C-alpha cells in the first residue's frame, strides 16, 4: 500500500468530504489554490464546484498521480512547484489539507495569500489534533488555539471550526 493509499484510507474514515465542502462553501466563480495537493483528491472534488483549481504539489510522484487522476478535469491547473516560491494571482480561496504545519515559509505564505488574492479571501485548513495516533510528530502539530492566533496576527478572522475525531477543519476570512 502506497503512502497516498494510506492517506486516502484515513481520509475516507475520518474526514467527511461533506464537512470539507461545507467549510469551503464553494461556488462557480471561485478560484481555489490546493496547497500540498498530494494525490489530488481534494483538487478533483473541488473542480466539480469551482471555476479553477490550482493543484500545487512539489513531489513529482504525486504530480503524476494528479495528472493521471485528473485527465477528465479541464479546470485543474497542476503546478509542480515549492509553495515557498509560488506566484499565482486572483484566487479567492486557499486550501491546506494536513500540510500547513510542515510549511517552513509561513511568512512568505501569508504575504503571498494576502498580496495575490481577491478579497474576501477564505482559507480552509485541515490539521491533526495532538491526540491523533497518526500524523506528524506532536511537536510540529498546530492545535486550534495556536492556529487561530497565527491567522489573527495576520489580519484574518476565524469563520468556522469543525471538530473531528483526530483532526479539525478551520476556516479564516480576510475581507
Image (cartoon, helix red, strand yellow):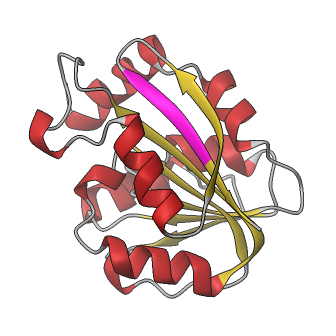
On the image, the x and y values in percent for residue 117 come to 68, 78
Magenta extent: 167-171
Residue 135 as seen in the image, left or right of residue 172:
left
Pick the front one: 16 or 102:
102
Quarter of image, res 56: bottom left
On the image, the x and y values in percent for residue 61 come to 26, 57
Quarter of the rendering occupied by the C terminus: bottom right
Residue 76 as seen in the image, left or right of residue 163:
right
Residue drawn at x 29%, y 42% is 142
On the image, the x and y values in percent for residue 138 come to 13, 34
On the image, the x and y values in percent for residue 66 come to 46, 54
Q: Is residue 86 above or below residue 165?
A: below
Quarter of image, res 121: bottom right
- Residue 137 seen in the current view: no
Residue drawn at x 57%, y 19% is 16
Q: Is residue 11 above or below residue 154?
A: above
Verify whether residue 68 appears in magenta. no
Pick the front one: 49 or 110:
110
Quarter of the rendering occupied by the N terminus: top left
**Dominant secondary-structure state across the stretch colored magenta:** strand
Residue drawn at x 36%, y 19% is 9
Amino acid at each position: 500500500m502506497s503512502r497516498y493509499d494510506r492517506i486516502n484510507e484515513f481520509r475516507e474514515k475520518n474526514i467527511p468530504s461533506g464537512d470539507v465542502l461545507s467549510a469551503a462553501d464553494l461556488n462557480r466563480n471561485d478560484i481555489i489554490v490546493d496547497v500540498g495537493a498530494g494525490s489530488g483528491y481534494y483538487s478533483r472534488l473541488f473542480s466539480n464546484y469551482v471555476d479553477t483549481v490550482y493543484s500545487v504539489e512539489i513531489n513529482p510522484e504525486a504530480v503524476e498521480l494528479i495528472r493521471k487522476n485528473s485527465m477528465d478535469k479541464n479546470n485543474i491547473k497542476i503546478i509542480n512547484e515549492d509553495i515557498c516560491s509560488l506566484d499565482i494571482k486572483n484566487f479567492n480561496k486557499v486550501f491546506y489539507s494536513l500540510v500547513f504545519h510542515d510549511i517552513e515559509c509561513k511568512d512568505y505564505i501569508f504575504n503571498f495569500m494576502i498580496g495575490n488574492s481577491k478579497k474576501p479571501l477564505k482559507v480552509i485548513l485541515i490539521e491533526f489534533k495532538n491526540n491523533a495516533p497518526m500524523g506528524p510528530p506532536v511537536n510540529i502539530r498546530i492545535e486550534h488555539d495556536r492556529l487561530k492566533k497565527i491567522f489573527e496576527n495576520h489580519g484574518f478572522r476565524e469563520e468556522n471550526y469543525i471538530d473531528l475525531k483526530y483532526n479539525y477543519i478551520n476556516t479564516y476570512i480576510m475581507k
